[in-house]
Image (cartoon, helix red, strand yellow):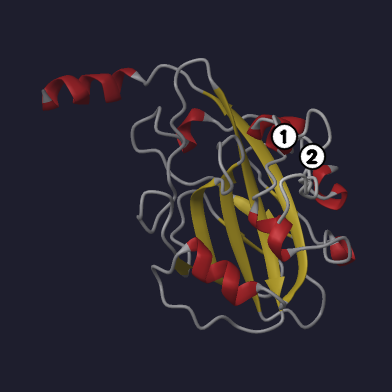
Amino acid sequence: MGANHRLAPRFLPPMGLANRTWKDRIMTDLPDWVASKLPPAARHPGLAIAALGDARTMGRGGFALSSPAFGVGEELDPCFTAKEEDAVAPPLEWTAPPPGAQELVIIAEDASTDGPSPQCHWLVWGLAGQRGALFEGEVPPRTGKNHLGNSEWLLPDPPVGETRQYVFQIFATELPLTLMPGASREDLITSLKGFVTACAVLPAPFTGVEADDGMEWDDEELD
């Protein structure tokens, strides 16, 4: 190679893209078919539904997820978080999925998480492929490991004054899952890929508050 030989220019991203922060990506990298269903602060591109759903399956046949405890975009009550003693998982309800659904799966994630994957708060499967509900604090048929490695509803616990965005996602699958309880988020997503026939989302923020007196008293007792 001669001294005057010029190397081919390297590819450089357009001005401004190279220095995009993760928060910038949240606003731009989630597909429109799901971004339109979520508030801007909850549009994490790594949400499970971005990998498993598409424009055809989103809300297919009127498939929808709701809760008698909060509306779309309404705050979670502290009784479903780490801020209250004896907190439990919130109640959820869903409409009938399209015909042929064999099983329903619920994944709840913290869309305020930095990094490529949001923190997983709940993995539920084994739900019958029909209209149904999970009551407040009900133990689901099968659960997988949350972000902390526990097979239960991970109680939201943001610092006082900080708002986090939680996204409940439901999937109808055309084949029953063979996963054993305690499976990971990655295992569940891998098992669902290519078999989702309908999906829906339910966003709910929560702003950190002081723990109730009972929990503070318990903490003092433990000291």
- Secondary structure beneath label 2: loop
The answer to the question of whether label 1 and label 2 lie on touching residues, with beta carbons closer than 8 A, is yes
- Please identify the quarter of the rendering in which residue 167 is found: top right
Question: Which corner quadrant holds the N terminus?
Answer: bottom right
* Crowd class of label 2 (few under 14; some 14 to 19; many from 20; radius 10 Å): few
183 shown above or below 3: below
How many numbered marks, from 0 up?
2
Mark nearer the N terminus (1 vs 2) = 2
Residue drawn where x is 56% and y is 36% of the image: 114
Return the residue at label 2. Answer: 13
Q: Position of residue 62 (x, y in %)?
A: 87, 61
Q: Identify the amino acid type marked 1.
A: Ala
Relative to 199, 192 lies left or right: left
Q: Identify the amino acid type marked 2.
A: Pro
* Crowd class of label 1 (few under 14; some 14 to 19; many from 20; radius 10 Å): few
Question: Which corner quadrant holds the C terminus?
Answer: top left
